[in-house]
Image (spheres, rainbow, N blue to C red):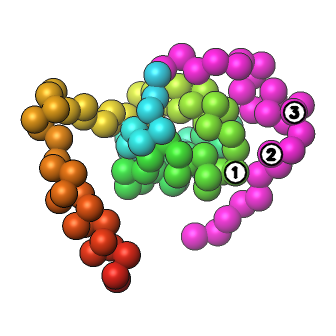
Amino acid sequence: MIRRPVDTGDPDRLYTVTGGRSEAQDDLDLVSLIVSECEPARGMQSEHVRILELCRHPTAVVEVAAELRLPVTVVRILLGDLLAMSKVTARHPRAASAVADLPDSALLLEVLHGLRNI
């Protein structure tokens, strides 16, 4: 995959990318998975095109931000645009309904030790 550089340092650029908006419409979690529902179309904003390309497979919001080298708040705004146009879908993380549904801490420690040993 070819990586295209994105200018992240210029506040004017970020203002232009978001159309002057500073808050996202949708409440996306950092680990919400985004999936493209279509191919990019001609005339689409370049950042929207990149998101659609990146999200052909489920991709977390934080990963999209890292790949685009843009702040998460900016990416959330862009994802809100795509959600409103039905170009992407979001799969929100499922919260445990009760403490009893959470994994045992001893099991989690064993998994952590196992991962460290790999």
Q: Residue at x 72, y 60 (%)?
A: 4
**Does the residue at mark 3 contact the one at mark 1 (Cβ under 8 Å)?**
no
Q: Amino acid at mark 2?
A: Thr
Is residue 16 found inside the magenta-colored segment of the image?
Answer: yes
Label at residue 11: 3
> Where is residue 33 drawn, in percent x and y?
38, 43
Q: Is 12 situated above or below 5?
A: above
Label 3 SS = helix
* CB within 8 Å, label 1 to label 2: yes
Q: Secondary structure at mark 2?
A: loop
Whether residue 31 is visible to the viewer of this picture, yes or no, is yes
Q: Is residue 105 left or right of residue 32?
A: left
Q: Amino acid at mark 3?
A: Pro
Q: Which residue is mark 2?
A: 8
Residue bearing the label numbered 1 = 69
Q: Nearer the viewer, residue 80 or 106?
A: 106
**Disc on the earlier residue, 3 or 1:** 3
Instruction: Spot the residue most to the bottom.
Output: 118
Callout 1: 10 Å neighbours few (<14), some, many (20+)?
some
- Real-space CA distance between mark 2 and mark 3, rounded to the nearest whole angstrom: 8 Å
- Which residue is outermost to the left? 100
Q: Residue at x 44, y 47 (%)?
A: 60
